[in-house]
């Protein structure tokens, strides 16, 4: 039984989500290939170096620079003949493609897998992580998305062979217009070792800048609760939680975050959780390893001075 890993590229490099997917695939089988859909043949070079990859299957065409999810899913489903597993990191990239592949192949994808029990049995969270469900698949083809925080990220090794796949590129009814993304010199939120997150308790967009100042002092990424995002304090790129980004840093500092169940689901795997909150009964405080029960502005001011 072989596995195909759907590769997500970020700035022409293999994403952390895809590296975790390679590790997960290796737990299922020793025969792991990678699939790259791109317009640039050089993109396959970094993928070929990922440890654990047996071969890189490259679908190359000028029209695939910004391939739509409809086109990508059709290409993936066409190449799945001969593979028992399709594995992808859990991200917006895979969530746009894998369910469509499931529809084309008439199988049920299993999303957000956090543990692999056996070749067809997996553990995934339900109800914002309050329940961990053990799911058994009887499908002949198994489609998985895996949480990057639950699996080690595969490193680099010897270069694997690259095979260019010749196939018909489907027509698309959609046209790429533009992409807008926020750029930051801070660590990426999903892979950062330290995160400082702010919540509604900060009171305003202007006050939220103290979170950014503290993060810069600590070399940390900036996060936010949904309440802070909805209030317009910061863009939704920084949202941590069930409907945002799932993180598992070494240190998570929650400032003015009460701890809605959806937020806790996105950061509960952090190694050390520090809550700065004047309400000791807040759900975040009950989960935290350390609680600083003080006015958050005084606390941040002291930390910046220190």
Image (tube, rainbow, N blue to C red):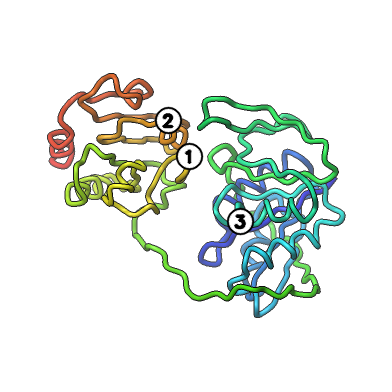
- Look at the picture and state if 127 lies above or below 74: above
Give me the C-alpha separation between circle 1 and circle 3. Answer: 17 Å
Q: x and y percent of residue 278 in the render?
A: 20, 25
- Count the numbered circles shown: 3
Residue designated by label 1: 242
In this rendered view, identify the residue nearer to me: 212 or 130: 130
For image coordinates 47% across by 33% down, the residue present is 265
Image location (x, y in percent) of residue 65? 60, 74
**Which corner quadrant of the image does residue 116 belong to?**
top right
Q: Residue at x 38, y 29 (%)?
A: 272
At a point 24% along the width and 30% down the height, the residue shown is 276
Which quarter shows the N terminus? top right
As helix, strand or loop, the secondary structure at mark 3 comes to: helix
For label 1, the SS is: loop
Instruction: Tell me the number on the disc at residue 261.
Output: 2
Q: Which residue is mark 3?
A: 96
């Amino acid at each position: 039984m072989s596995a195909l890993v759907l590769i997500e590229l970020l700035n022409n490099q293999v994403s952390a989500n895809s590296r975790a997917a390679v590790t997960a695939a290796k737990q299922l089988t020793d025969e792991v290939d990678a699939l790259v859909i791109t317009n640039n043949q050089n993109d396959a070079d970094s993928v070929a170096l990922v440890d654990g990859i047996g071969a890189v299957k490259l679908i190359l065409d000028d029209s695939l620079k910004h391939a739509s999810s409809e086109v990508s899913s059709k290409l993936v489903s066409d190449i799945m003949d001969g593979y028992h597993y399709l594995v992808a990191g859990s991200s917006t990239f895979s969530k746009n493609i894998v369910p469509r592949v499931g529809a084309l192949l008439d199988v049920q994808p299993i999303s957000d897998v956090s543990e692999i029990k056996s070749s067809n049995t997996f553990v995934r969270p339900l109800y914002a992580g309050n329940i961990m469900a053990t799911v058994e698949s009887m499908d002949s083809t198994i489609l998985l998305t895996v949480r990057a925080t639950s699996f080690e990220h595969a490193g680099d090794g010897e270069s694997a062979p690259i095979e260019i796949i010749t196939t018909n590129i489907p027509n698309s009814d959609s046209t790429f217009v533009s992409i807008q993304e926020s750029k930051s010199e801070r660590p990426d939120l999903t892979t950062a070792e330290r995160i400082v997150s702010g919540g509604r308790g900060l009171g305003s967009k202007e006050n939220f800048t103290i979170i950014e100042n503290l993060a810069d002092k600590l070399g940390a990424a900036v996060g936010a609760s949904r309440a802070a995002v909805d209030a317009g304090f910061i863009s939704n790129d920084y949202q941590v939680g069930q409907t945002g980004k799932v993180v598992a840093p070494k240190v998570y500092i929650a400032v003015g975050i009460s701890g809605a169940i959806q937020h806790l689901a996105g950061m509960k795997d952090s190694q050390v959780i520090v809550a700065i909150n004047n309400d000791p009964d807040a759900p975040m405080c009950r989960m935290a390893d350390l609680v600083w029960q003080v006015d958050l502005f005084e606390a941040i001011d002291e930390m910046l001075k220190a």
